[in-house]
Amino acid sequence: MGLDMYLTAKRYIWRHQEAIVEAVKRLNLAKSHYRPKQIEYEAACWRKANHIHGWFVRNVQAGVDDCNEYDVGTHDLEKLLAVCKKVMLEHHLAHELLPTVEGFFFGGTAYDESYFEDVQYTIDALTLIVFDEDAKHLDFYYQSSW
């Protein structure tokens, strides 16, 4: 039990990539009258990284923390990447730029090694997305659960 967070990338394929649709059908994952609609990828996931979750709540979810799935634009991911890079360069700005958030089993709120490991993981994951030419064909979504 605790805060789990997921950044998902989706690509809608229905009517666009018949070869993929046929390949998925051959796998017998569903009855033949069902048509695959999308491919979904896990782009990033975190566990109890409440500071990253707080950023999404403030900047993507309009302050609403309700475990629903929210559309995340690549411009949002670029902003979060920039914030994380700034925090890694200037640790003393962490409480201002990427503050921790208390919550039900949200994990620790100290600006410690674990905090900065989550920030570095976020940099690594978002760098792969932001500089990937194929990412412009994907739709990104953030969702949390606890």
Image: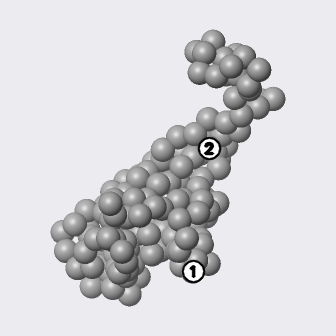
Q: Which residue in the protein does label 1 denote?
A: 63
Residue 124: x and y in percent read 37, 53
Compare marks 2 and 1 and give the one earlier in the sequence. Answer: 2
- Left or right of 85 on screen, residue 143: right
Q: Position of residue 2 (x, y in %)?
A: 34, 63
- Badge 1 density bin: few <14, some 14–19, many ≥20, Cα 10 Å: few
Which mark's residue is nearer the viewer, 2 or 1? Answer: 1
Picture quadrant where residue 74 is located: bottom right
**Neighbourhood count class around disc 2 (C-alpha, 10 Å): few under 14, some 14–19, many 20 upward:** some
- The answer to whether residue 105 is left or right of residue 25 is left
- In the image, residue 29 sits, relative to residue 126, either above or below, namely above
Up/down of 94 relative to 40, above or below: below
Asked if the residues shown at circle 2 and circle 1 are in contact, with their CB atoms under 8 angstroms apart, the answer is no
Look at the numbered disc 1 and give the secondary structure of its residue. loop
Q: Residue at x 48, y 47 (%)?
A: 43
> Circle 2 sits on which residue?
10
Q: Split into 4 quadrants, where in the image is the N terminus?
A: bottom left
Numbered label tally: 2
Which quarter of the figure has residue 117?
Answer: bottom left
Kind of residue indicated by mark 1: Gly
- Check the picture and name the quadrant holding the C terminus: bottom left
